[in-house]
Image (tube, rainbow, N blue to C red):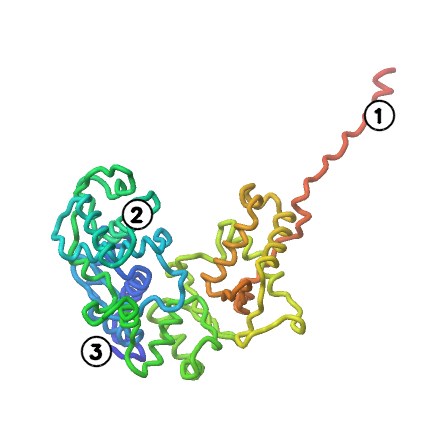
Amino acid sequence: MRISAADPLDGLADIDAANVVRCARTLLRRPLLRLGGPDGELLPLVYRHRVVLGEMFTALLGYRLVVERKFARLYKSGPGRDSTRGVPELSPRGYAYLALTMGALTGTGRQVLLSRLVSDVRSAAVEAGIDVVDTISDRRALTAALRHLVSLGVLTETEGSVASASQDAPAEALITIETDLLGQLLAGPVADAPDGPSLVSLAARTAPRRVDFQVRRKLVESPVVLYAELADDEREWLLRNQRRESYLLERCFGLFTETRLEGILAADPEEYLSDVMFPGTSTVARIGLLALPDLLAQDEEESEVDSAGRRPVTAGTVLAVCERLVADYPAAWSRAAAEDLDGIVAEVLALFVHMGLAVPDGERWWLSPAAARWWPEPDGDPEREVAEVPAAPEVPGWSLFDEEGGA
């Protein structure tokens, strides 16, 4: 059955359409889905609907889908400009070791000793012109890369653990390599790339003149899409096709769009596709939410505004707002948070950037008008947290009954 880009699920029974949407959402969240991994129990359903899923991803997003019995791999369009979407556990050094480890594993076979693998990775680093120093931080970066490959299912700790690689005298371990998964990790064709930047460019390439691919990818992968951040042809296409795109995003991926003057927000009511929740329950998320009214309520005549309607804020401005919030609501935060406001400010600003609500620019951050969507409405005034002074006990006095009793 050949699907239609106007409605990729047309002709499917309701239950099959619902299952396709469920699988598509899972693949967007976990581009490498495997048996035994997170959401791995859904892999048989993905395999059953692999034809419809593959054609839908190709027709709507220009993504390539590979589905086997043991795994499914959705090839997305590369990292883009957002540097906040990496693996939190991997430092730049860890990412370098991840690439070197993948290269060292290609000619290893099915099993390898940990000591041999570490030696091969360090030899590959020397060949690549990377300085290798046997320090604790360097060993931790290598261990983080190995652990990440274990979490992806590429490496299996058959005997021992890769964690020992961070020790001065690492214990021996036997590692099993899932070669099928290893070959599916890189999104770009290595044989066609003469260097690293070229590989990234090839991984992010799309079909020529497919403006719809570019715009839909941004709507699906980004919390907020501002018209001012789109190219002229992308903005014109989106304004012309807003209603149809809203239908497709809801129909195929369960996303509900909110159209505003500055742009479009694609919200997931189930909060499954988002790796960061906002608003959230953490101290950083709650302080960031409560800080928005003060940060957004600036004099329009005095405040600088860019072409996207964003207003600049500084770390000092955010710090002043956070100080007031901690003073007004002392019982709402932990003592550690109250004592490290500079750290809280840095995390709040990083959260805004991660959510697409702010853009860093030197010592300033441009706050998006889309942040007004989360304008909080407190239940009361800060005075409600002021401890009540207990009333003084009444001094007992004489009564008519006391007089009668004493008579």
Mark 1 vs 2, N-terminal side: 2
- In this orientation, which residue lies closer to the viewer: 227 or 258? 227
- Tell me the residue that label 3 is attached to: 2
Instruction: Identify the residue under disc 2.
Output: 133
Q: Nearest to the eye among marks 1 and 2: give it.
A: 2
Task: Say which quarter of the image contains residue 167.
Answer: top left
| Residue 45 as seen in the image, left or right of residue 322 | left
Quarter holding the C terminus is top right
Numbered label attached to residue 397: 1
- The answer to which of marks 3 and 2 sits earlier in the sequence is 3
Q: Position of residue 68 (x, y in %)?
A: 17, 62
Question: Residue 261 at what x, y percent from top left?
Answer: 53, 76
The span from disc 3 to disc 1 (Cα, nearest Å) is: 93 Å
Quick check: 296 above or below 155? below
Residue 187 in the image, given as x and y percentages of width and height: 25, 66
Callout 1 touching callout 2 (CB < 8 Å): no
Query: Does 42 appear above or below 247?
Result: above
